[in-house]
C-alpha cells in the first residue's frame, strides 16, 4: 500500500510532466496554426471576388490578384500602403491588422473613452483588368463572432461578392449565412443610393418584397428561422462599411 506522501508526490510529478508535454505541443503547433489561420483569411478574401485557391497556392494567387493593401483612418486617409510586396507608406502591413482590435478602439472612442485611432484594412484587387475593393467584416452573431468580406465594384457602391463565416450559429438556421445560396443574394446590391448617401445592405425579415420597390436594391432576404443572426449580419455590414465612407467619397471626387 502506497503512503499518502508517495501518492501526492507521484500525482504532482505527473501533473508537471503532462503540463510540460501540453505546453511543448502548443508551442510546436502554434506556427502551423497561425499559418492555417492566415491561409484561410487569404482564401476568404479571394473568394469574395470569385477567385478559388487551394491552400498550397493561396499566397501566390493572393500576390497575383491583390495589388494593394491600405490601412485607413476614420478620415478616409491611408496611414499605411503596402504595394508590390513593399511599403509605400507606413510600416504596418494592413493584412496583419486585427480587425477585432480596431473595432474595439472605435467603440471606445464612440463611448468617449481614450483610445488609439483605429485603422481599417482595405484590399484592392485587379482581376481581368477590373478593379475591386475588398472590405473585411466582423460582428457578433447569436452564439459567437461572425465575419466575412464584401467586395465592391469599381464604382465603389455595387457589391461584386461576399463571404460570411461564423463560429457557432445554429445549423440549418443562422449557420445558413455561410451558404452560397444566401451569399449570392448580395451580388449587384448597392451600399449607396444614387446620390452616394450611405444605405448599407440590409438583411430583411420577411424578404425584400416588404421593402419599397426603390429600396430593394439595398436589401436581401433574411435566413428563414434565423432572425437574430440575420439582424447581426445587417449590423455587421453597416457598422463595418461606415468606416470606409469617407475614403470612398474622397475617391469619387
Image (cartoon, rainbow, N blue to C red):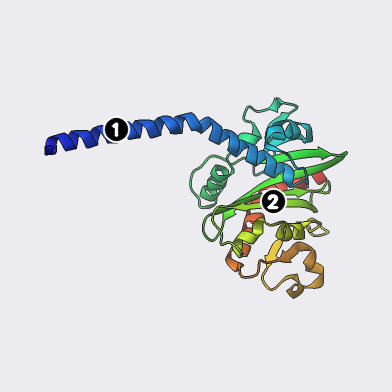
Q: Quadrant of the N terminus?
A: top left
Q: Quadrant of residue 59?
A: top right
Q: Is residue 226 above or below residue 114?
A: below
**Residue 183 seen in render:** yes
Relative image position of residue 237 (x, y in whole percent)? 66, 55
Q: Quadrant of residue 4?
A: top left
Q: Residue at x 13, y 37 (%)?
A: 2
Q: Residue at x 80, y 43 (%)?
A: 132
Relative image position of residue 134 (x, y in whole percent)? 73, 44
- The residue lying furthest to the front in this view is 1
Q: Give the number of the mark in front: 2 or 1.
A: 1
Q: Is residue 232 left or right of residue 108?
A: right
Residue nearest the observer in this picture, 155 or 85: 85
Residue nearest the observer in this picture, 117 or 25: 25
Disc 1 element: helix
Relative image position of residue 23 (x, y in whole percent)? 39, 32
Q: Quadrant of residue 5?
A: top left
Residue 163 got which mark?
Answer: 2
Residue nearest the observer in this picture, 89 or 33: 33
Relative image position of residue 16 (x, y in whole percent)? 29, 32
Q: Is residue 107 above or below residue 82?
A: below
Disc 2 element: strand
Residue nearest the observer in this picture, 180 or 252: 180
Residue 16 got which mark?
Answer: 1
Q: Is residue 76 left or right of residue 26?
A: right
Amino acid at each position: 500500500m502506497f503512503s499518502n506522501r508517495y501518492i501526492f508526490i507521484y500525482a504532482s510529478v505527473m501533473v508537471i510532466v503532462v503540463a510540460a508535454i501540453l505546453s511543448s505541443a502548443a508551442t510546436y503547433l502554434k506556427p502551423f496554426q497561425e499559418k492555417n489561420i492566415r491561409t484561410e483569411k487569404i482564401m476568404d478574401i479571394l473568394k469574395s471576388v470569385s477567385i478559388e485557391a487551394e491552400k498550397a497556392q493561396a499566397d501566390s494567387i493572393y500576390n497575383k490578384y491583390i495589388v494593394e493593401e491600405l490601412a485607413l483612418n476614420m478620415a478616409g486617409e491611408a496611414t499605411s500602403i503596402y504595394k508590390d510586396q513593399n511599403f509605400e507608406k507606413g510600416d504596418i502591413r494592413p493584412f496583419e491588422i486585427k480587425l477585432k482590435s480596431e473595432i474595439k478602439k472605435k467603440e471606445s472612442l464612440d463611448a468617449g473613452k481614450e483610445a488609439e485611432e483605429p485603422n481599417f484594412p482595405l484590399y484592392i484587387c485587379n482581376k481581368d483588368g477590373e478593379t475591386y475593393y475588398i472590405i473585411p467584416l466582423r460582428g457578433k452573431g447569436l452564439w459567437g463572432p461572425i465575419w466575412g468580406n464584401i467586395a465592391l465594384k469599381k464604382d465603389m457602391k455595387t457589391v461584386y461578392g461576399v463571404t460570411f463565416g461564423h463560429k457557432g450559429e445554429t445549423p440549418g438556421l443562422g449557420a445558413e449565412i455561410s451558404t452560397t445560396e444566401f451569399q449570392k443574394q448580395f451580388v449587384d446590391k448597392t451600399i449607396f443610393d444614387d446620390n452616394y448617401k450611405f444605405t448599407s445592405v440590409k438583411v430583411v425579415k420577411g424578404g425584400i418584397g416588404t421593402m419599397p420597390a426603390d429600396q430593394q436594391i439595398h436589401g436581401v432576404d433574411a435566413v428563414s428561422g434565423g432572425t437574430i443572426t440575420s439582424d447581426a449580419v445587417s449590423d455587421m455590414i453597416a457598422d463595418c462599411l461606415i468606416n470606409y465612407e469617407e475614403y470612398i467619397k474622397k475617391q469619387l471626387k
